Amino acid sequence: MTRKACVHNLGCKVNAYESQAMQQLLTGAGYEIVPFAPGADVYVINTCSVTNIADRKSRQMLHKAKKMNPDAVVVAAGCYVQTGSEKLIEDGTVDLILGNNRKQNIVEALDEFYRSRTPSADIIEINRTKEYENLSINGDSDRARAFVKVQDGCNQFCTYCIIPYARGRVRSRTPEDVLEEIKVLVSAGYKEIVLTGIHLSSYGVDFADRKERLLDLIKMTAEIPGVMRIRLGSLEPGIITEQFAAELSKIPQICPHFHLSLQSGCDATLERMNRRYRTKEYAEKCEILRRYFDRPALTTDIITGFPGETEEEFEASYRFVSDIRFFETHVFPYSRRKGTKADRMDGQLPEHVKKERSNRLLKLDSERRKEYASSFIGCEAEVLIEEEVTCEGQRMLTGHSKEYLNMLIPFTKSVAPGDIVKVRALRFAQDLHCNLVGTII
Ligand code: SF4
């Protein structure tokens, strides 16, 4: 009898990649993959632990899975396992616990469970390992864009972040392994490769006997026939140098879309966050990118209401964000995370203050998105078509430009998802905020 399994993902793009990899391992072992609904024999929850709320959500999903089928095997995998294993073991809902660096053993762990019917936990001391977990995907889902994980862990210890404790130190995947996976993805039809990791800028710093760093990996990726676009996951400002930007700008497939994590536009707050740059340096990095790329899409993350953030500090942060003129700002009200330094800091702010500051930044973000997108009206853009949608009452095709602008074109049979077409942007769509409608040229 074929067993039915579902893998439910919580959290970031790296987790999503690992969920896809586990799903493929299960398929390879003969499991039928089913949606997260009643009726499965195995529920794998790939948990997240970035905030206290993420922990709670992880626990809720595990309980929900057990409720869906009390006879099913419930597997807790990933970050919450690393930070909350005691609670998980105590709780008793979960049959198998697989920590980070152990997801590759999902099939063997299930085999063992079916043999012995004994719950087990496989958790390593993630802070002590130097090993990169060998997971890979072959991309059998029907998307145009493939995320490729190239690195795990982080050495930065920002005061609000639990990630270094949940995912351990920087571990990079060998270029050979990365390139092998990209070749498989390209032959499966993927045109765009997104290089991603927990701290992508640190790619290669842990290699003992080899010299490749992120720029080398990007160059090698660009040499693979069929790679039409390369997009980069979140970068630390420190990696952007004149030379880095100059070299990058010579690679035709590079998408001029750079996510430079900022978190606060106030130096005093950055200091308390233990971020390694200050606003002056950050602004210089943005200038460098703008010198080497035409209207690059600069995006960022901001935390509002970090402990001790005064009204003046927030105003400084707001002004800085406004002056940089980002394409997109992802705004997060500060969320306490047990086990971090920031959680123990004085000056924790009430939720309504965090919310009010977030709302101000979200309003600014919405204006800036519109401003950036409108600068492309009348211009040509190369769009990777992703899917068919209904917009303004008609069939349309949608996809993203290299800058990650969402574009719509009238439906035509001659274009299919996965195609790259040249489009002239004509106007904003009526019912979708900031999407542009264009025509094929
Ligand atoms: S750089 Fe800072 S925020 Fe990012 S994963 Fe590392 S510790 Fe967390």
Image (tube, rainbow, N blue to C red):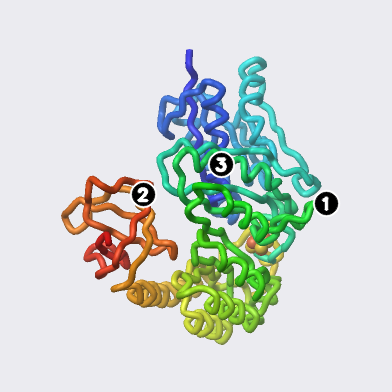
Q: Is 422 positioned to the left or the right of 298 in the image?
A: left
Q: Secondary structure at mark 3?
A: helix
Amino acid type of the residue that numbered disc 3 sits on in the rendered structure: Lys
Q: Which residue is mark 3?
A: 183
Residue at 38% across / 47% down in the picture? 418
**Can residue 85 be seen in this snapshot?**
no
The foreground one among 121 and 344 is: 121
Q: Nearer the viewer, mark 1 or mark 2?
A: 2
Q: Work out whether 164 lies above or below 437.
A: above
Q: Work out whether 178 lies above or below 312.
A: above
Q: Is ligand 1 closer than 8 angstroms to the Cβ of mark 3?
A: no
Is there CB contact under 8 Å for labels 1 and 2? no
Amino acid type of the residue that numbered disc 1 sits on in the rendered structure: Ala
Residue at 27% across / 59% down in the picture? 440
Q: Residue furthest left?
A: 393
Q: Quadrant of residue 113?
A: top right
Numbered mark located on residue 77 in the image: none
Name which of mark 1 and mark 3 comes first in the sequence: 3
Q: Secondary structure at mark 2?
A: loop
What whole-number distance in Å separates the C-alpha atoms at marks 1 and 3?
A: 26 Å
Numbered mark located on residue 419 in the image: 2
Q: Work out whether 71 lies above or below 45.
A: above
| Residue 397 percent coordinates (x, y) | 28, 52
The foreground one among 183 and 331 is: 183
Amino acid type of the residue that numbered disc 2 sits on in the rendered structure: Asp
| Residue 51 percent coordinates (x, y) | 58, 56
The mark tally for this picture is 3
Residue at 52% across / 51% down in the picture? 193
Q: Which residue is mark 1?
A: 208
